[in-house]
Image (cartoon, grey):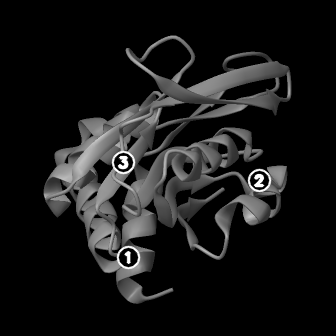
Amino acid sequence: MTTADTALAELLTSRIRDVQDYPKPGVLFKDIAPLLADAAAFAALTRALAERARELGATKVVGLEARGFVLAAPAAFAAGLGFVPIRKEGKLPGEVFRRSYELEYGSATLEVQCDAFAPGERVLVVDDVLATGGTVGASLDLVREAGAELAGVVVLMELGFLGGRERLAPHLGGAPLETLVMV
């Protein structure tokens, strides 16, 4: 990790608030609202994401519902790239590819529009948190099913103790998985 990476991680970490017992007792929630409200921290995060998109040769940036949208859309704009949302089932018009996956407490389904990518486009997937890997893994599968290539994945926070990185390995196909803040 470079000095710049360390400084960015420290800035971002300092703006992420811990909320005890949310959304249920025993859970320590990592709230990014203070980071988003701090113009300097949000700008530094956006610049870092845009730089990675350019370095990885991405042609589009994908954001995962819902907080991933808040991070990916400005990064796409700053990099001069298009933005594509991956949404929960039933939220997108037209023909979609869909992928269901298991959560700790049930299952969920994500969708992307069938015409979101031109064949062979390179995509950077951005999300706020990597926990167990289910959401990101399903999203990576959708990107490929829609005809795009995975340039990489960048997450703001990784909850390393949940093992999501290991579960994502089969979905990455050699593309990099990067974390700005390890929790």
- x%, y% of residue 32? 44, 38
Sequence-wise, the earlier of marks 1 and 3 is: 1
Q: Identify the residue under disc 1.
A: 56
**What residue is rendered at 27% in x and 42% in y?**
73
Question: Can I make out residue 121 in this image?
Answer: yes
| Residue 67 falls in image quadrant | top left
- x%, y% of residue 152? 50, 67
User: Quick one: 42 or 166, which is closer to the camera?
Assistant: 166
Relative side of 75 to 172, left or right: left
**Residue 117 circle label:** 3
Q: Amino acid at mark 2?
A: Gly
Relative to 42, say whether 44 is above or below. below
User: Quick one: 72 or 100, which is closer to the camera?
Assistant: 100
Relative side of 53 to 127, left or right: left
Q: Amino acid at mark 3?
A: Phe
Secondary structure beneath label 1: loop
Secondary structure beneath label 2: helix
**Residue 48 circle label:** none
